[in-house]
Image (cartoon, rainbow, N blue to C red):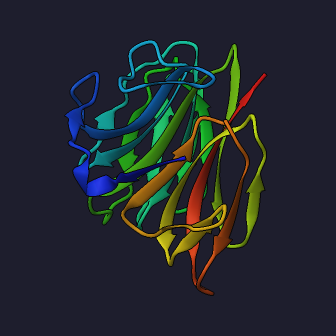
Protein backbone atom coordinates (compact mmCIF):
# COMPACT_ATOMS: atom_id res chain seq x y z
CA UNK A 1 0.00 0.00 0.00
CA UNK A 2 1.22 3.51 -0.85
CA UNK A 3 0.32 6.93 0.58
CA UNK A 4 0.50 10.26 -1.23
CA UNK A 5 0.04 13.81 0.06
CA UNK A 6 -1.95 15.73 -2.57
CA UNK A 7 -0.23 19.04 -1.75
CA UNK A 8 3.09 17.48 -2.81
CA UNK A 9 1.88 16.64 -6.32
CA UNK A 10 2.90 19.34 -8.79
CA UNK A 11 0.28 20.40 -11.36
CA UNK A 12 1.06 19.86 -15.04
CA UNK A 13 -0.64 21.17 -18.18
CA UNK A 14 -3.20 18.90 -19.84
CA UNK A 15 -1.89 17.07 -22.88
CA UNK A 16 -3.76 19.59 -25.07
CA UNK A 17 -2.83 22.57 -22.85
CA UNK A 18 -6.50 23.29 -21.98
CA UNK A 19 -6.13 23.05 -18.21
CA UNK A 20 -4.04 21.73 -15.34
CA UNK A 21 -3.87 18.25 -13.82
CA UNK A 22 -2.16 16.54 -10.93
CA UNK A 23 -1.09 13.01 -11.92
CA UNK A 24 -1.57 10.74 -8.91
CA UNK A 25 -0.74 7.21 -10.06
CA UNK A 26 -0.50 5.24 -13.29
CA UNK A 27 0.39 1.68 -14.22
CA UNK A 28 1.46 -0.07 -17.40
CA UNK A 29 0.49 -3.59 -16.39
CA UNK A 30 -1.04 -5.15 -13.32
CA UNK A 31 1.51 -4.84 -10.54
CA UNK A 32 3.90 -2.60 -12.50
CA UNK A 33 3.62 1.01 -11.44
CA UNK A 34 4.90 3.89 -13.56
CA UNK A 35 5.14 7.57 -12.76
CA UNK A 36 4.03 8.90 -16.14
CA UNK A 37 0.79 8.67 -18.14
CA UNK A 38 2.35 7.89 -21.54
CA UNK A 39 1.31 4.34 -22.49
CA UNK A 40 -0.25 3.65 -19.09
CA UNK A 41 -3.01 1.05 -19.02
CA UNK A 42 -4.66 3.00 -16.21
CA UNK A 43 -4.12 6.31 -14.51
CA UNK A 44 -5.69 8.45 -11.83
CA UNK A 45 -5.43 12.24 -11.72
CA UNK A 46 -7.00 15.40 -10.33
CA UNK A 47 -7.92 17.93 -13.02
CA UNK A 48 -8.77 21.57 -12.39
CA UNK A 49 -11.33 23.17 -14.70
CA UNK A 50 -11.21 26.93 -14.22
CA UNK A 51 -12.90 27.76 -17.57
CA UNK A 52 -14.78 26.02 -20.37
CA UNK A 53 -12.24 23.79 -22.11
CA UNK A 54 -11.75 20.94 -24.55
CA UNK A 55 -10.64 17.65 -23.00
CA UNK A 56 -7.66 15.78 -24.42
CA UNK A 57 -8.42 12.79 -26.65
CA UNK A 58 -7.40 9.35 -25.33
CA UNK A 59 -8.03 6.63 -27.95
CA UNK A 60 -8.74 3.18 -26.52
CA UNK A 61 -9.36 4.54 -23.02
CA UNK A 62 -12.56 4.55 -21.00
CA UNK A 63 -12.81 7.65 -18.84
CA UNK A 64 -14.44 7.80 -15.42
CA UNK A 65 -14.85 11.07 -13.54
CA UNK A 66 -16.37 12.43 -10.38
CA UNK A 67 -16.77 16.14 -9.69
CA UNK A 68 -15.48 17.23 -6.29
CA UNK A 69 -17.10 20.28 -4.71
CA UNK A 70 -20.11 22.14 -6.08
CA UNK A 71 -21.32 23.26 -9.51
CA UNK A 72 -21.87 21.16 -12.61
CA UNK A 73 -20.29 20.58 -16.01
CA UNK A 74 -21.77 19.34 -19.26
CA UNK A 75 -19.53 17.38 -21.61
CA UNK A 76 -20.54 17.75 -25.25
CA UNK A 77 -19.08 16.25 -28.41
CA UNK A 78 -20.24 15.96 -32.01
CA UNK A 79 -21.95 12.63 -32.50
CA UNK A 80 -22.08 11.67 -28.81
CA UNK A 81 -24.77 12.07 -26.19
CA UNK A 82 -24.02 14.93 -23.76
CA UNK A 83 -22.79 13.85 -20.34
CA UNK A 84 -23.74 15.86 -17.23
CA UNK A 85 -21.22 15.75 -14.41
CA UNK A 86 -22.65 16.71 -11.03
CA UNK A 87 -20.98 16.69 -7.60
CA UNK A 88 -20.15 13.25 -6.27
CA UNK A 89 -22.02 11.44 -9.07
CA UNK A 90 -19.52 9.29 -11.00
CA UNK A 91 -19.86 9.23 -14.79
CA UNK A 92 -18.19 7.17 -17.52
CA UNK A 93 -17.53 8.10 -21.15
CA UNK A 94 -15.22 7.04 -24.01
CA UNK A 95 -11.87 8.74 -24.51
CA UNK A 96 -12.04 9.02 -28.32
CA UNK A 97 -14.45 11.95 -28.85
CA UNK A 98 -13.32 15.56 -28.54
CA UNK A 99 -15.28 16.38 -25.39
CA UNK A 100 -15.81 20.03 -24.57
CA UNK A 101 -16.48 20.85 -20.92
CA UNK A 102 -18.99 23.64 -20.35
CA UNK A 103 -19.31 24.84 -16.80
CA UNK A 104 -22.77 25.51 -15.41
CA UNK A 105 -23.29 29.27 -14.84
CA UNK A 106 -22.09 30.23 -11.37
CA UNK A 107 -19.69 27.29 -11.07
CA UNK A 108 -16.38 28.39 -9.63
CA UNK A 109 -13.13 26.54 -10.21
CA UNK A 110 -13.99 22.85 -10.42
CA UNK A 111 -11.92 19.75 -9.73
CA UNK A 112 -12.44 16.31 -11.27
CA UNK A 113 -11.03 13.03 -10.04
CA UNK A 114 -10.29 11.18 -13.30
CA UNK A 115 -9.72 7.48 -13.77
CA UNK A 116 -8.76 6.30 -17.25
CA UNK A 117 -8.42 2.62 -18.15
CA UNK A 118 -7.43 0.87 -21.38
CA UNK A 119 -10.72 -0.83 -22.15
CA UNK A 120 -9.10 -3.72 -24.06
CA UNK A 121 -7.48 -5.05 -20.88
CA UNK A 122 -9.13 -3.37 -17.88
CA UNK A 123 -12.42 -2.27 -16.40
CA UNK A 124 -12.54 0.70 -14.04
CA UNK A 125 -15.08 2.37 -11.80
CA UNK A 126 -15.38 5.22 -9.33
CA UNK A 127 -17.61 4.95 -6.26
CA UNK A 128 -18.46 7.47 -3.56
CA UNK A 129 -18.46 5.56 -0.28
CA UNK A 130 -19.50 6.35 3.29
CA UNK A 131 -19.35 2.93 4.93
CA UNK A 132 -16.99 -0.02 5.31
CA UNK A 133 -15.71 -1.53 2.06
CA UNK A 134 -13.58 -4.62 1.34
CA UNK A 135 -11.41 -4.71 -1.78
CA UNK A 136 -10.08 -8.16 -2.70
CA UNK A 137 -6.57 -9.05 -3.84
CA UNK A 138 -6.12 -8.73 -7.60
CA UNK A 139 -8.04 -5.45 -7.83
CA UNK A 140 -5.98 -2.25 -7.98
CA UNK A 141 -7.54 0.54 -5.94
CA UNK A 142 -7.11 4.12 -4.75
CA UNK A 143 -8.97 5.82 -1.90
CA UNK A 144 -9.36 9.62 -1.82
CA UNK A 145 -10.94 10.68 1.51
CA UNK A 146 -13.28 13.67 1.17
CA UNK A 147 -14.32 13.99 4.82
CA UNK A 148 -13.30 12.25 8.02
CA UNK A 149 -10.58 9.68 8.50
CA UNK A 150 -10.40 6.14 7.15
CA UNK A 151 -8.62 3.14 8.64
CA UNK A 152 -7.11 0.78 6.07
CA UNK A 153 -6.26 -2.87 6.75
CA UNK A 154 -5.29 -2.50 10.37
CA UNK A 155 -3.25 0.51 11.39
CA UNK A 156 -3.00 2.81 8.34
CA UNK A 157 -5.15 5.95 8.75
CA UNK A 158 -5.77 8.46 5.94
CA UNK A 159 -7.80 11.66 5.75
CA UNK A 160 -8.58 14.59 3.49
CA UNK A 161 -5.56 15.73 1.50
CA UNK A 162 -4.18 12.21 1.19
CA UNK A 163 -4.48 9.37 -1.31
CA UNK A 164 -3.94 5.71 -0.45
CA UNK A 165 -3.50 3.18 -3.27
CA UNK A 166 -2.39 -0.33 -4.07
CA UNK A 167 -1.62 -2.15 -7.33
CA UNK A 168 -3.81 -5.09 -6.29
CA UNK A 169 -1.15 -7.07 -4.44
CA UNK A 170 -3.36 -7.61 -1.43
CA UNK A 171 -6.88 -7.00 -0.25
CA UNK A 172 -7.85 -4.04 1.90
CA UNK A 173 -10.57 -3.41 4.46
CA UNK A 174 -11.55 0.29 4.48
CA UNK A 175 -13.41 1.56 7.55
CA UNK A 176 -14.66 5.10 8.24
CA UNK A 177 -13.65 6.40 11.66
CA UNK A 178 -16.26 9.18 11.88
CA UNK A 179 -20.00 9.17 11.14
CA UNK A 180 -19.62 11.86 8.44
CA UNK A 181 -16.67 10.21 6.66
CA UNK A 182 -16.85 9.94 2.88
CA UNK A 183 -14.37 9.06 0.15
CA UNK A 184 -14.04 8.32 -3.54
CA UNK A 185 -12.88 4.77 -4.26
CA UNK A 186 -11.29 4.01 -7.63
CA UNK A 187 -11.23 0.34 -8.67
CA UNK A 188 -9.34 -1.21 -11.58
CA UNK A 189 -10.14 -4.81 -12.57
CA UNK A 190 -8.47 -7.02 -15.18
CA UNK A 191 -10.81 -8.28 -17.88
The vertical placement of 108 against 167, above or below, is below
Seen in the image, is 160 located left or right of residue 123?
left
Looking at this view, name the residue that lies furthest to the bottom: 179
Residue 83 x %, y %: 57, 42
Q: What is the quadrant of the C terminus in the image?
A: top right
In the image, is 190 to the left or to the right of 180?
right
Tell me the residue at 24%/47% (across/down): 51
Q: Seen in the image, is 122 located left or right of residue 142? A: right
Q: How many marks?
A: 0
Q: Position of residue 124 (x, y in %)?
A: 66, 35
- Decide: is 58 above or below 133: above
Q: Is residue 177 above or below residue 130?
A: below
Pinpoint residue 39: horizontal percent, then vertical percent.
45, 12
Question: Can you give x and y, in whole percent of width and height, for residue 125 in the image?
Answer: 67, 42
Residue at the (27%, 63%) spot, across then down: 108
For the residue pair 130 and 96, the one nearer the viewer reads as 130
Q: Which of the 4 image quarters holds residue 173?
A: bottom right
Q: Residue at x 50, y 20 (%)?
A: 97
* Residue 37 occupies quadrant: top left
Nearer to me, 81 or 2: 2
- In this rendered view, identify the residue nearer to me: 187 or 76: 187
Give left or right: position of 153 versus 165.
right
> What residue lies at 41% left-to-right and 66% top-to-bottom?
69
Please tell me which residue lies in front, 73 or 88.
88
7 w.r.t. 157: above or below: above
Amino acid sequence: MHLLLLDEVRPEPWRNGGGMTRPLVSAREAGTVSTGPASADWRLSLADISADAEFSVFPGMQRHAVLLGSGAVSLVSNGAEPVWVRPLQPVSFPGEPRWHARREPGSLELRFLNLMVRRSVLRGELQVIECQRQVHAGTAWALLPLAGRWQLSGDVIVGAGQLAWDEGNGGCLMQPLEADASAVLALVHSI
